Image: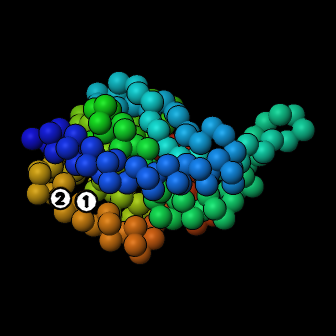
Amino acid sequence: MKRIFDFLFSFFLLLILSPFIVFVGILIRFKLGSPVIFKQQRPGLNAKPFFVYKFRTMTDERNDCGEFLPDHLRMTRFGQLLRKLSLDELPQLFNVLKGDLSLVGPRPLLMEYLELYTRDQARRHEVRPGITGWAQVNGRNAITWEEKFKLDVWYVENRTFCLDLKILFLTIMKVFKTEGISQDGHVTIEKFSGTKDA
């Protein structure tokens, strides 16, 4: 039932939002350059790798050695607006159609984090990752990694269709309120380096 709902709802959203998605893509092309879509490998269900799609939000500015400048130097006001309104997440609807993502589930993080999780934290991969999740509506990037993983595992143990609907509703509210977009002192959130007391 969850997979059927994911497919039908994401298909409906893409159908309705396709002109807007194209418009946003054109704006990104002119303001930030190409490629418009940012693609990165992330762990999915059972930690199986897949490529997640997002609209780019940063420039490609580099230093004299050809290395990317720090995130905060490559983030423009336009990119901040995309993240503030969660518009950078729109291409992930294609991931939902493909079955890589669910609408609701623990957010897919970096591949390099896999070896840093405790056994309990790794349980977040027992379900398909999502565009939004229980951690996103309970703090998003403003909470610690440990708090976020506890919320992810709670979702894994308590997930229901009604809970998913609640999370989707709360996500819409969070987007309008633009809460928890970043952690103090960071463009989004500092990298996870492992749980110190694990």
Residue 181 higher or lower than 94, as above or below? below
Q: Does residue 136 appear to the left or right of 37 in the view shown?
A: left
**Residue on which the image places disc 2:** 165
Q: Is residue 137 visible in this depiction of the protein?
A: yes
Mark 2 Cα shell of 10 Å, populated few (<14), some (14-19), many (≥20): few
Q: Nearer the viewer, residue 45 or 191?
A: 45
Instruction: Give the distance between the C-alpha atoms of the residues marked 2 and 1, in whole angstroms.
Output: 5 Å
Q: Give the residue drawn at x 61%, y 54%.
A: 27
Q: In this view, does 57 lie to the left or right of 91?
A: right
Residue sitting at the far bottom: 177
The answer to whether the residue labelled 2 contacts the one labelled 1, judged by CB atoms less than 8 Å apart, is yes
Please state the horizontal and vertical placement of residue 47, each as a whole percent of the image: 34, 28
- Quadrant in the rendering for residue 72: bottom right
**What is the x, y in percent for residue 100?**
32, 32
In which quadrant of the rendered image does the N terminus lie?
top left
What number is the disc on residue 82?
none
Residue appearing at x 24%, y 60% in the figure: 167
Q: Where is residue 132 in the image (x, y as percent from the top left)?
A: 33, 53
Q: Which amino acid does label 1 sit on?
A: Leu
- Front position in the image: 180 or 60: 60
Camera-side residue: 43 or 52? Answer: 52
In the rendered structure, the answer to whether residue 145 lies left or right of residue 45 reads: right
Against 85, is 65 above or below? above
> What amino acid is at disc 2?
Leu
Q: Which residue lies furthest to the top in this view?
A: 48
Binning the other alpha carbons within 10 Å of mark 1 as few (below 14), some (14 to 19) or many (20 upward) gives some
Please tell me which residue is depicted at 52% across the width and 33% down the height of the picture.
40
| Residue lying furthest right | 64
Task: Give the quadrant of the C terminus.
Answer: top left
From the image, tell me which residue sits under label 1. Answer: 168
Residue 54, given in percent of the width and then of the height, sits at 49, 44
Q: Which residue sits at x=52%, y=54%?
A: 23
